[in-house]
């Protein structure tokens, strides 16, 4: 494929010949016989975006799930009405996602029995780590006597009784292509080899166009109720001894402190990751830098959940949320992601949130954590193996490109996915607006 009249972020204009990798970048090139030609018309060509933390199967399932988060449901009566009107899936379940206590308080089987229809119902907390099942649903998974119906997502003792969702990946992939996303890292914990193989097959067969990397089995979710420094240290040391890195889910200060202590004891691996780092206390910033771990974070939650944060988090601690700039200043490697479907799947919105730090209510949350637009954009240029090493528009780099119908200054000024004109993966056009 030959892309003509492309603007690069440095302001130069070039033609780009691309196959599995970029073959050549230079002044006006003549098409080879049979070569597909795309006229960028002065639009900006950048490396295809890599979303460094997503959940593909959950995103596919979300397409047929009812949303019950604070943006969609506001009261207990609202929740009952939405659940009553929801469609039952082909597996016989009513599946709802995005729940937060702001809607109707803490959710358990008793409350769900009162509010939901008498069919199997499971409601996922917006954090993604917890499901609440009603009594009919608990009986379906063999847990009729469970005390409260609150089950962890990563607990396969109950989730294995569910029918795996094997549809919807194509729809997710097509949508990601419209954003210029050419690769993703699936951060779902507990994936078995068979699950990973199915994702790779979906990519090979063209259903899933993006290149896919999976963190499992090196991903671990922590819970404040059972933090175990000794066990975590042993697990990290074992992973490192086998030559593998770890990725640890840290959404609270306690989880981060324990993880940093475990990394310090076990020793570093150059590809260790901290997922989310939603809360980084001031006295943990230096320790985080010393660990050498890469932080993969989601500033989009400032825009999506900032109103709730301003209500729930003490003012003196709000600057600790979803840090970016202060981590970079301290020398912490940082990459951005969306956490799709728990966050909005449009990476350009995450970039804008990193630049503006504006909540859905219009307030600014963590002004000192703002980063320049170019920096926010390039934090989606890394690869699965090197999240903080931006790929370039240069010979030998992957042939995964995003073509934007605007000049570089306009791209950086707007950071808008509607500007994406085309997406190229391995030298092939997979999306054209």
Image (tube, helix red, strand yellow):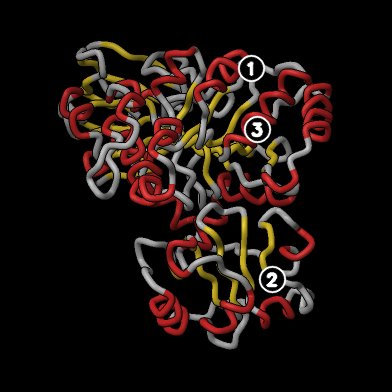
Disc 2 is placed on an element classified as loop
Please name the residue shown 36% across and 69% down the image.
74
Q: Quadrant of residue 114?
A: bottom right
Q: Is residue 34 visible?
A: no
Please name the residue shown 68% across and 46% down the image.
223
Q: Which of pointers 3 and 1 lies earlier in the amino acid sequence?
A: 3
Whole-percent x and y of residue 266?
A: 78, 20
Q: Which of pointers 2 and 3 lies earlier in the amino acid sequence?
A: 2
Q: Which mark is residue 247?
A: 3
Residue under circle 1?
291
Q: Looking at the image, do the residues carrying marks 2 and 3 touch, with CB atoms under 8 Å apart?
A: no
Q: Which mark is residue 118?
A: none
Would residue 370 be found to the left or right of residue 67 on screen?
Answer: left
Disc 3 is placed on an element classified as strand
In this rendered view, identify the residue nearer to me: 411 or 250: 250
Real-space CA distance between mark 3 and mark 1, rounded to the nearest whole angstrom: 13 Å
Residue under circle 2?
148
Q: Quadrant of residue 240?
A: top right
* For discs 3 and 1, the disc positioned in front in the rendered view: 1
* For discs 2 and 3, the disc positioned in front in the rendered view: 2
Q: Looking at the image, do the residues carrying marks 2 and 1 touch, with CB atoms under 8 Å apart?
A: no
Q: Quadrant of residue 82?
A: bottom left
Q: Residues within 10 Å of mark 1 (few under 14, many from 20)?
A: many
Real-space CA distance between mark 2 and mark 1, rounded to the nearest whole angstrom: 38 Å
Residue 121 in the image: above or below residue 364: below
In this rendered view, identify the residue nearer to me: 198 or 319: 319
Please name the residue shown 54% across and 27% down the image.
295
Residue 304 in the image: above or below residue 369: below
Would residue 238 be found to the left or right of residue 119 on screen?
Answer: right
Q: Which of pointers 2 and 1 lies earlier in the amino acid sequence?
A: 2
Q: Residues within 10 Å of mark 2 (few under 14, many from 20)?
A: some
């Amino acid at each position: 494929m030959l892309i003509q009249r492309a603007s690069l972020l440095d302001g130069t204009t070039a033609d780009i010949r691309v196959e599995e990798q970029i073959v050549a970048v230079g002044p006006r090139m003549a098409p080879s016989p049979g070569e597909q030609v795309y006229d960028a018309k002065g639009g900006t060509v950048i490396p295809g975006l890599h979303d460094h933390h997503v959940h593909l199967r959950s995103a596919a399932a979300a397409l047929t799930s009812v949303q019950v988060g604070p943006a969609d449901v506001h009261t207990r009566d609202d929740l009952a009405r939405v659940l009553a009107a929801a469609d039952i899936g082909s597996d016989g379940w009513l599946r709802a996602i995005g729940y937060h206590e702001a809607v109707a308080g803490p959710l358990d089987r008793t409350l769900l029995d009162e509010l939901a229809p008498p069919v199997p119902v499971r409601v996922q907390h917006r954090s993604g780590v917890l499901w609440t099942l009603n009594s009919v649903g608990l009986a379906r998974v063999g847990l009729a006597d469970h005390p409260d119906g609150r089950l962890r997502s990563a607990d396969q003792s109950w989730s294995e009784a569910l029918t795996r969702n094997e549809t919807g990946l194509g729809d997710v992939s097509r949508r990601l292509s419209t954003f210029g996303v050419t690769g993703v890292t699936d951060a779902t914990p507990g994936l078995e080899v068979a699950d990973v193989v199915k994702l790779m097959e979906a990519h090979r067969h063209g259903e899933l166009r993006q290149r896919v990397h999976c963190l499992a089995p090196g991903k671990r979710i922590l819970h404040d109720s059972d933090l175990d420094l000794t066990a975590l240290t042993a697990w990290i040391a074992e992973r490192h001894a086998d030559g593998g890195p770890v990725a640890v889910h840290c959404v609270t200060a306690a989880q981060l402190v324990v993880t940093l202590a475990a990394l310090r004891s076990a020793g570093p691996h150059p590809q260790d990751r901290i997922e989310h780092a939603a809360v980084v206390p001031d006295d943990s910033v230096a320790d985080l830098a010393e660990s050498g771990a890469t932080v993969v974070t989601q500033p989009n939650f400032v825009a999506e959940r900032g109103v709730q944060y301003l209500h729930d988090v003490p003012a003196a601690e709000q600057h600790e949320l979803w840090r970016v700039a202060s981590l970079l200043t301290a020398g912490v490697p940082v990459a951005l992601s969306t956490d799709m479907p728990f966050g909005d799947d449009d990476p350009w919105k995450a970039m804008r949130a990193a630049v503006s730090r504006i909540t859905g209510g219009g307030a600014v949350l963590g002004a000192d954590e703002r980063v320049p637009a170019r920096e926010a954009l390039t934090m989606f240029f890394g690869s699965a193996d090197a999240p903080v090493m931006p790929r370039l528009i240069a010979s030998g780099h992957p042939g995964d490109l995003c073509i934007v119908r605007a000049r570089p200054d306009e791209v950086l000024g707007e950071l808008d996915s509607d500007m994406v004109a085309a997406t190229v993966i391995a030298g092939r056009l997979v999306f054209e607006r």
